Image (cartoon, coloured by chain):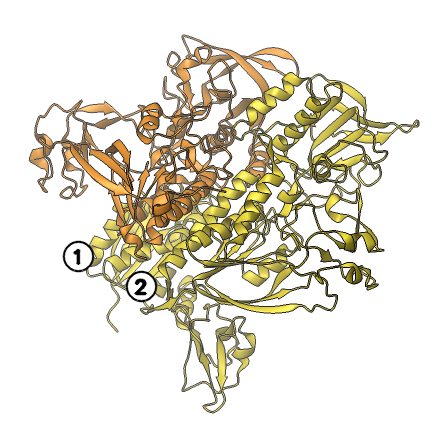
Chain colours: A orange, B yellow
Amino acid sequence: MDLRKKNVLVIGGGVCGIQSSLDLADMGFNVYLVEKEPSIGGHMAQLDKTFPTLDCSACILTPKMVDVARHPNINLLTYSEITNISKGDRFNVTILRKPRYVEEEKCTGCGICTEHCPIEVASEFEMKLSTRKAIYVPFPQAIPLVFTIDKEHCITCGLCEKMCEAGAINYDQKPINMSVKVESIIVATGFNSFDARKSGEYGYGRYDNVVTGLEFERLLSAGGPFGGHLARLSDGKIPKRIAFIQCVGSRDEKSGNLNCSRVCCMYSTKQAVLAKEHVPGVDIQIFYSDIRAFGKGFEEFYRRSENEFGVKFIRGFVSEILEDPDTKNLLLRVEDTETEELIDREFDIVVLSTGLWPRNDIELMEKTLNISRSNDGFFAPAELQLSSVIATTSGIYIAGAAEGPKDIPDSISQASAAAMKASISSVRTHIGGITDD
Amino acid sequence: MIKPRVGVYVCHCGTNIAGVVNVEDVTKYVEKLPNVVTAKHYVYMCSQPGQVLIKNDIKELNLNRIIVASCSPRMHEPTYQTALEEAGINPFFFEMANIREHVSWAHINEPERATEKAKDLIRMAIARACLLEPISKMEVNVTEKALVLGAGVAGITAAYDLAQMGFEVYLVEKESHVGGHLALLNQLSRSRDASEILTSLTQKLSTPKIKLLNNSEVVEFTGYVGNFKAKIVQKPRYVNAKCDLCGKCEDVCPINLPNRLNFGLNQRKAIHLPLPNSYPPIYVVDKENCNGCGNCLKICENGAINLNDKPLEIDVDVGMVIVTTGFEPYKPDGEFGYGKYKDVITQLTLERILSKNGPSKGELVTPSNGKSPKNIAFIMCVGSRQESCDNQTIKPINAYCSRYCCSSTLKNALLIKQNSPESNVYVIYRDIRTFERGNEELYRSCRASGITFIRFKQDVPPTVEKTSNNQLTVNVKDYLFKVNMEINVDLVVLVEGMVSRNDTDDVRFKFSITRSEDGFFQEAHAKMNPLNTFAEGIFIGGACQGPKDVEDTVLQASGAAAKAAIFLCRGKVVLDLVTATVDEERCTGCAKCVNVCPYKAIELDETKELVQVIEVKCKGCGSCSSTCPIGAVQVRHYRDKQILAMVENILPS
């Protein structure tokens, strides 16, 4: 059987979509990998290091991104969105290729355009902690390494066009609708971080030094806004005391999410260890209700963080944060369940361990894909199926955080599982997908 | 030989290297070394711009040797080799100097000496690189069949996935029934009936693509990726498929034995059906305990029994192997009164008790007197999350969390509480880790149902004793309310963790895979490659890689099947000939190398009086080379002169 004639659509170019695409393409299928953003990489590209091994995230992700770019069986469609899916004998998929205003085939990624662009815009990749230009790549290791003009902010001054030696700039580029027919679909659209503004008691958005987990990740990162020198946002001072508040937007009725986000305990522990490496002697206290170090090597890492690095874990509920308007220091009111005391403690930075939520556009995706969601808002596995990758419409598979919060190894295992099911479904399309039983 | 033209690329690895090593200084130093045409440093050499830098230099500066000073070759050697290939030079004209693990991480507090060491390592790498030779490739066909080891939920899932792709699978299972630990369970999370799930799984085994070999073990395993050979021995079950499960044989069998699968809670006969819903649905004779009386033979109307059956030897050729051997439950012998008091049981035993096909047909009763318990305590983290503490640990430390147990405990606790609301259920825990979809709700339901949660600290663990009036008692210090509690109970359930199987080493050596610190099989990369092993063509999935629940096991199994399917679909695999080679002029045919080769890849040609290498079998381990008394056998890419050049360059000149 010539698998190259069998098409599979993978939606989402985070680590999960990348893994599914590589597995399918390696088997011989023809893969369309569609990513909304200008580059693949997803949230993992934003991470500094990964738990529990402290592998540098870029070091282990970028090779897979490069593999995607050079794989002969993968059609990489970045800056593109799925606008319609209809089911006939196969899935008819309409893909909107948003104009980059830079011709992908011509751009060499040299970056002269961005050097000359006069417009500074808050960088989404840097969690708006630093800026990018109106013509930009989200991060230096982006795949494809092709610039994009953010038309919302571009003033069409023409400098980039003038400077571009490759003649790649095209202000008149139009959106293109392309349609493809595919045998099966993998949905790997990932998650959004919880919007910490919804937990008003922690003052996020009002207090300079209250940051989210993902923001703190950028602050720690060598490629981040401070070049890896940990400093606080209000005054650039090196922090001496850092608090982490767990379960912000997870296991919390008020926020509307009762579920555990699975990764926050470990990412906070990792960030605490990294902060200790950045700033020797920094006092770190993690306020938690249960430490959920359940994956391979996680408990061992948690123990090390306490015994070897001196991270303090305090089982307590933070009821409120107050900011000292002069120093911008943060006063935490905590009920320590061990001493049953209500204590007030001052910190330089407070990190909110924000949970993983369904993507903001998930309702739209739900309609386009015609698959169901669970109570928690993530895409739901079909009932009574043992395998959680099987969606409620046959021929469609879900993987990674689109199906619910999960860490990288679990996402990757699920990505491969989805690839397996999609490949079976694709070679047996005539009977209409597969079921587990 | 063409004069070497070397390009050296020093990676910052963000701040991983550049935070310690002065990369600029290193680059300047390297630039001046002999044969070096260019030396550059860059923030992430492995990124696309980093690779483009190398490729452009190869073309523009006509480089023929590339050195990247960065991390361990384990992850990125293939990355750079591909870049070399794309630039049109042989991928083996490449050398990596590990200045991250071996330098910046190891000497984080000594930046100056670290910088000097980085220079030394790169100098050595250049010396070797200049002597490298091109290595050719060989394409071999892949046998389009797979071997799956272990027919638990993972093995069946992986086998069925591959079968659906059209590949033949040998599914080898040690036990006489399939289903592994799933077969022992009562319910999975969200009240799903375990035996129904088992049935839906075993139905899949009827596909002709799957050859199920029960009672079987792989006794010999040889070959290489795409072309493995396995010798399987299938022990007889002494009953054949004519068995109609009438059960008369069992009635007349005089031998009574404790039923292992019910943890000794009841007895079985020497001829028995392992579990009421066993698959295959055929009786089996426990020959070790059979007295050969022949009663069963006489009563069997179908003539299904033959006590003289002999073991079968089956040789199979397979291209890929998936190891799904599962786990063993931790045995808390001597802990919390287990083994001493009958009513202290493990959670797996509780599953058997609660199971409709279990010893009490699903009725919750205590093992000591068969009465239904009113007060039940669960003690969690038994054999998990252990730290060296003096008061009780007698066994090797299992530092890890067993992942499945919190949710599993709460499921059982709630089931008991709901079935008899008047009972008192205590859950004695350290952290509640109900992270799976929907299980936070389970936790809330438990709290709302009136189950008592008691949090203890590892250094003050609960104790289980019998008081003078024979009352089973749990003593525990509640860490949240600071009170010492003495709880009278009828049943104590120790929630045991998962441990690696006893035969892990046997499997590991047979299939050349490795174990991680926790004892389970080691994946090729903890984050990015959880299903591959370091042995090409051998994959792992499920609890043999680490504790996990059924749902996660199923995902890993399908994922591992995908990895195997990649090779099976392609039908071909390309091998690099980094293999041994014989200098025929000098070889004396002493054959010392033949004896040391672990892969039987070297043979003596007696007529020519010299040895020959079978290249597809050779793994390039170098045993032959180091044994040869005159250096006539050399391994390509690791020739003596290439290694000695490095040694010479580290010694002070």
Quarter of the figure with residue A123: top left
Spot the residue most to the front.
Answer: B301
Left or right: A215 as drawn, with respect to A108: right
Say whether residue A359 is visible.
Answer: yes
Q: In the figure, B81 relative to A217: above or below?
A: below
Judge the density around disc 1: few (<14), some (14-19), many (≥20) Cα neighbours within 10 Å.
few
The residue that appears at 48% across and 81% down in the rendered structure is B630
Say whether residue A36 is visible.
Answer: no
Spot the residue most to the bottom.
Answer: B607
Q: In the figure, B179 relative to B511: above or below?
A: above
Q: In the figure, B614 relative to B420: above or below?
A: below
In this figure, what is the number of numbered marks?
A: 2
Tell me where residue B47 appears, x and y as whole percent.
Answer: 30, 45
The residue that appears at 71% across and 50% down in the rendered structure is B274
Kindly identify the amino acid type of the residue bearing the numbered disc 2. Phe
Sequence-wise, which precedes: disc 2 or disc 1?
A: 1
Tell me where residue A222 appears, x and y as whole percent.
Answer: 36, 35
Spot the residue most to the right.
Answer: B468
The residue that appears at 84% across and 39% down in the rendered structure is B340
| Secondary structure state at the residue bearing disc 1 | helix
Considering the image in quadrants, where does the N terminus of chain B appear? bottom left
Tell me where residue B180 appears, x and y as whole percent.
Answer: 63, 48
- Circle on res. B93: 2
Kindly identify the amino acid type of the residue bearing the numbered disc 1. Glu
Question: Is A286 in front, or is B440?
Answer: B440
- Circle on res. B60: 1
